[in-house]
Amino acid sequence: MSESDFLRERYGLGPDDMFPLRPGEWSKVFGFRKGGVEYVARFSKYREDFDKDAHMARYSSAALPIPPIIEIGETADGYYAISKRMTGGYLDDLDADGMRRVLPSFWAALDAMRDIDLSAHTGCGGWNCVKNGTRSRFCSTPRKKKARSRRIGPPTDPPNWFCRLLSDRPKASGDVSDLLRLK
């Protein structure tokens, strides 16, 4: 059974109740309307991703809007998750003026993420089903010696100065949009 057929059967949707959404990295995504409310349905082979989303929704705030997961279930081919739809756009789609408009909200979201109390959890990097990181420290990945290459761009592992910068960074305050002039 296709994902759209699953939604039609489970929620009694008609053809005009469903609409396309941009696909996710690890899931197929559909939008639908039911009772005047718009929802997002995501389908994946992995339930753990949806469980993580449900956990992170606990930290939702005005500065960091995370839609709560309403339902997680199993399909013949994997799993699905339903949440209320939050509209927005993608940073990658913005031009310079659009970036200038969203940067204050972007910085506020980063500050909200930094303010989350993670003292009950350990580690960093990717995290597992018990909400602990897969690494002991951000910069704990040992660097392998490689032959010099002509690679241009940032290193794949964070350098020590970057780790110190993150740990020493004071909390931002005020409007920083004037400091950033994208050209």
Image (cartoon, helix red, strand yellow):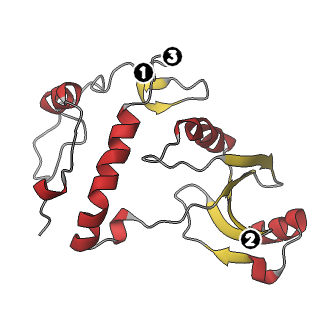
Question: How far is mark 1 from mark 3, CA to CA?
Answer: 10 Å
Q: Is residue 21 above or below residue 64?
A: below
Question: How far is mark 1 from mark 2, CA to CA?
Answer: 40 Å
Q: Amino acid at mark 3?
A: Ala
Q: Locate residue 99, reporting x and y percent.
A: 26, 65
Quadrant containing the C terminus in the rendered view: bottom left
Q: Residue at x 21, y 50 (%)?
A: 175
Q: Residue at x 75, y 46 (%)?
A: 72
Q: Is residue 147 above or below residue 102?
A: above
Instruction: Name which of mark 1 and mark 2 comes first in the sequence.
Output: 2
Q: Amino acid at mark 2?
A: Arg
65 vs 113, left or right, is: right
Q: Name the front one of labels 1 and 2.
A: 2
Q: Is residue 43 above or below residue 114?
A: below
Q: Locate residue 67, reporting x and y percent.
A: 59, 50
Instruction: Name which of mark 2 and mark 3 comes first in the sequence.
Output: 2
According to the picture, the residue beneath numbered tag 3 turns out to be 120
Q: Secondary structure at mark 1?
A: loop
Q: Residue at x 19, y 30 (%)?
A: 170
Q: Locate residue 37, reporting x and y percent.
A: 72, 66
Q: Is residue 158 above or below residue 140?
A: below
Q: Amino acid at mark 1?
A: Gly
77 vs 167, left or right, is: right
Quadrant containing the N terminus in the rendered view: bottom right
Q: Locate residue 26, reporting x and y percent.
A: 57, 55
- The disc at residue 123 is 1
According to the picture, the residue beneath numbered tag 2 turns out to be 33
Judged from this view, the residue extending furthest toward the bottom is: 16
